[in-house]
Image: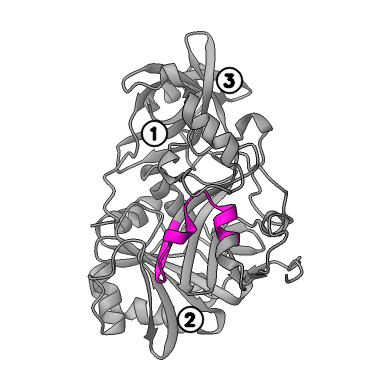
Amino acid sequence: MTPHVRRTDFTGTPFNSRTAPLNRNQRWVAWDIYHVVDVFSDVQCELRAVREAAAMIDMSPLAKYEISGPSARRFVDRIITRNAEKLDIGQVYYTPWCDENGNIVSDGMVFRPNERTYRITGDPCQRWLEKNAGGLDVEIRDVTHERGILSLQGPKSCEVLELASNEEWSDLGFSRVRSTKLRGVEVEVARQGFTGERGYELCVASEGAVVVWDALWEAGKGLGLRPAGLRTHDVARIEAGLIIPGPDYTKGGVDDERGSAIEVDAEHMTSPYQEGLGRLVDLDHGGFVGEKALRAESESGPCRRRVGLLIDWRDIAALFADQNLPPVVVPVPQWYPSPVYHGDDRIGRATSIAWSSTAGSIIGFGVLTTKFCGPGTRLSVEFPIGESRARAEATVCELPFVKLRRGD
């Protein structure tokens, strides 16, 4: 196993020389050791490009681990909740991985580029991976800083990619991967994305990143292609009903030096069944970390469940007005939990609260006691208003908030 990569400097991603000049507002956000663009120009315009045209999003800070060696498949089968034997070459899984108690350590993607190699992308978890590699002949290599990831998302993303590569891409199925070259640079293209739209994630060696950006940028000029910042990506993934560690759950397992900067308490550890990811737990293959606990929960049923929440922004504005304050109605996605009540009883928490222009509402996730998860249930969410706290009305709804078109 390779030693931990310890980086204390703060740097731009492999695409920085292209994203920086386009960042009109010079608004940046820290992600691991990198700074990435928060908002290039306007969130609503960028989100419209994701939903109606195409957008490029720099996702390079995602942790990337290359898994190889004679025991690579057995190792992957041990750590993820899905059956690694069913993962074909050229395929990618979205999956959680759990601790012994069935709590999610993280969630992310598992790629299988060839017979004996896998790649995992998600939140940093090298210590946890190494902890679970005992007795296996496997190498775990952190390649995060060697590769960039550019996410091309939107209904016109296929057209952009085809113009840039002079190849047909409409035949690449969802969660499938193949390689190509853009202006002579080797690129791995996965039909994936975290926005709910049709899209592709392009993984490229860092030294070739700028060439790939330029190829897509030139190809998309006449198709409405825009750069989109991390905040736009965050709103899009909330609309699509997709979770991230930190804001939506406290990670179980071994702490890593890097990873989500949003830490909440152990009360907010959660299982795949509670997060609506039970379809990604394959109890038949057995022998994976957390299997016993998850098998028991599958039989008893989860005590709480994640649902959608529609929150009345007018209630929040009125709460500010009551205290003679200007209304500040969720200007950025809320990355901390808020208590949820049914009457006077606290029955869960709300996470990832954001204004969604697509849904025309303030939206968020509610992780609630199961009996209160029925669509149409009226609840209240607590918000900080000035130096005090007050509640706004909310209604339970099914997830996702938008129609998922990523498999179209």
Q: Which amino acid, mark 2?
A: Val
Q: Earlier in the sequence, mark 2 or mark 1?
A: 2
| Disc 2 secondary structure class | helix
Q: Residues within 10 Å of mark 3 (few under 14, many from 20)?
A: few
- Residue 56 versus residue 101 in the image, above or below: below
Q: Residues within 10 Å of mark 1 (few under 14, many from 20)?
A: many
- Boundaries of the magenta span: 75-93
The way the protein has been coloured in the rendering is: one colour
Cα distance in 3D space between marks 3 and 1: 18 Å
> Mark 1 — residue?
362
Q: Position of residue 210 (x, y in %)?
A: 48, 81
Residue 389: mark in rendering: 3
Q: Is residue 155 visible?
A: yes
Q: Residues within 10 Å of mark 2 (few under 14, many from 20)?
A: some
Q: Nearer the viewer, residue 30 or 352?
A: 352
Q: Which amino acid, mark 1?
A: Ile
> Mark 2 — residue?
210
**Residue at 28 percent of width and 65 percent of height:** 173
Q: Position of residue 331 (x, y in %)?
A: 47, 40
101 relative position to 87: left or right: right
| Disc 1 secondary structure class | strand
Q: Is residue 336 visible?
A: no
| Disc 3 secondary structure class | strand
**In terms of image quadrants, where is residue 271?**
top right
Q: Which amino acid, mark 3?
A: Arg
**Residue at 33 percent of width and 31 percent of height:** 398
Cα distance in 3D space between marks 3 and 2: 47 Å
Cα distance in 3D space between marks 2 and 1: 36 Å
**Residue at 49 percent of width and 78 percent of height:** 204
Q: Position of residue 92 (x, y in %)?
A: 42, 63
Q: Earlier in the sequence, mark 3 or mark 2?
A: 2
